[in-house]
Image (tube, helix red, strand yellow):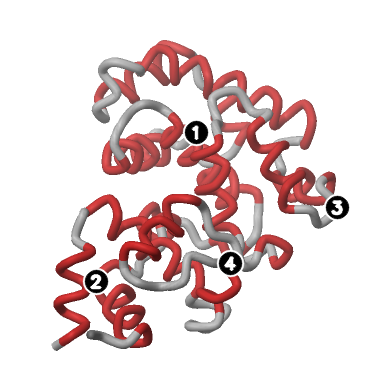
């Protein structure tokens, strides 16, 4: 049987790339644009599509130049729907195009397009953060969890954060399904990578392969 240390090492070797990193977002900057792009990705993952399709949609939005709330505000519904459709959102492109506008309007009206102001409004409470994220049209529990799971790299009040998907994967791998216990196994900086690796393992359905590799 592989040790938990070896299982974690194997996980990070195979899947240890955050979703923000895959999107090309440097959250360490903690500035409006990276946070906005992560929020858009969180909304896209809340649609009934696969994780790979949500990533393609988020990258398509960046290619279209919608990297801030102000830039997205300048877009029209037809263009948003077309960009999403061409990235694979054939069934939900129109609905998602509308949700993006509603989300963006609220972001601009309540927080001036700056998610750091949402953070300030939550007064350091992760539960309040999650509630405020879910208040955006189109972002459900899954999307809010993804945002918090990734942003904990720079928002210390969210650390250690683990959502249901990551914890379910941890349990299947024989790791403790507890955020605090999992945080003890890696550095502060590597913890978001571990959470992403657990989710990617679940999506890939390769927990048995990870365990087999860890035993070698």
| Image position of 155 with respect to 93: above or below | below
In the depicted structure, whether residue 191 falls above or below residue 132: below
Which comes sooner in the sequence, label 1 or label 4? 1
Mark 2 and mark 3 in contact? Answer it, CB < 8 Å: no
Picture coordinates of residue 17 (x, y %)? 36, 66
For image coordinates 61% across by 19% down, the residue present is 102
* Pointer 3 residue: 123
> Could you tell me if the residues under marks 2 and 4 are in contact, i.e. CB atoms within 8 Å?
no
Q: How many marks?
A: 4
Residues marked 3 and 1 touching at CB (< 8 Å): no
Give the mark toward the camera: 2 or 1.
2
Mark closer to the chain start, 2 or 3: 2
Q: Position of residue 68 (x, y in %)?
A: 58, 39
Q: Secondary structure at mark 4?
A: loop
Residue labelled with disc 4: 153
- Tell me the CA gap for discs 2 and 4: 20 Å
**Residue position marked by numbered label 2 in the rendering:** 14
Tell me the CA gap for discs 1 and 4: 19 Å
Q: Tell me residue 213's x, y (percent).
A: 16, 79
- Which of the two labelled residues, at mark 4 and mark 3, occupies the earlier sequence position? 3
In primary-sequence order, the first of circles 3 and 1 is 1
Quadrant location of the C terminus? bottom left
């Amino acid at each position: 049987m592989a040790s938990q240390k070896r299982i974690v090492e194997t996980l990070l070797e195979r899947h240890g790339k955050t979703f923000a990193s895959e999107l090309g977002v440097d959250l360490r900057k903690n500035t409006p644009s990276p946070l906005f792009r992560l929020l858009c990705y969180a909304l896209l993952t809340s649609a009934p599509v696969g994780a790979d399709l949500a990533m393609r949609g988020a990258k398509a939005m960046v290619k279209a130049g919608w990297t801030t709330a102000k830039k997205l505000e300048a877009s029209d519904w037809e263009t948003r729907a077309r960009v999403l459709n061409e990235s694979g959102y054939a069934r939900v492109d129109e609905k998602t195009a509308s949700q993006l506008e509603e989300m963006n309007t609220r972001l601009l009206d309540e927080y001036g397009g700056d998610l750091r102001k949402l953070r300030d409004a939550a007064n350091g409470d992760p539960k309040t953060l999650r509630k405020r994220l879910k208040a955006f049209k189109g972002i459900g529990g899954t999307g809010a969890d993804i945002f918090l799971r990734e942003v904990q790299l720079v928002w210390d009040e969210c650390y250690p954060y683990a959502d249901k998907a990551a914890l379910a994967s941890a349990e299947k791998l024989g790791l403790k399904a507890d955020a605090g216990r999992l945080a003890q196994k890696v550095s502060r900086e590597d913890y978001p990578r571990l959470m992403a690796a657990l989710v990617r393992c679940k999506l890939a359905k390769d927990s048995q392969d990870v365990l087999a590799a860890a035993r070698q």
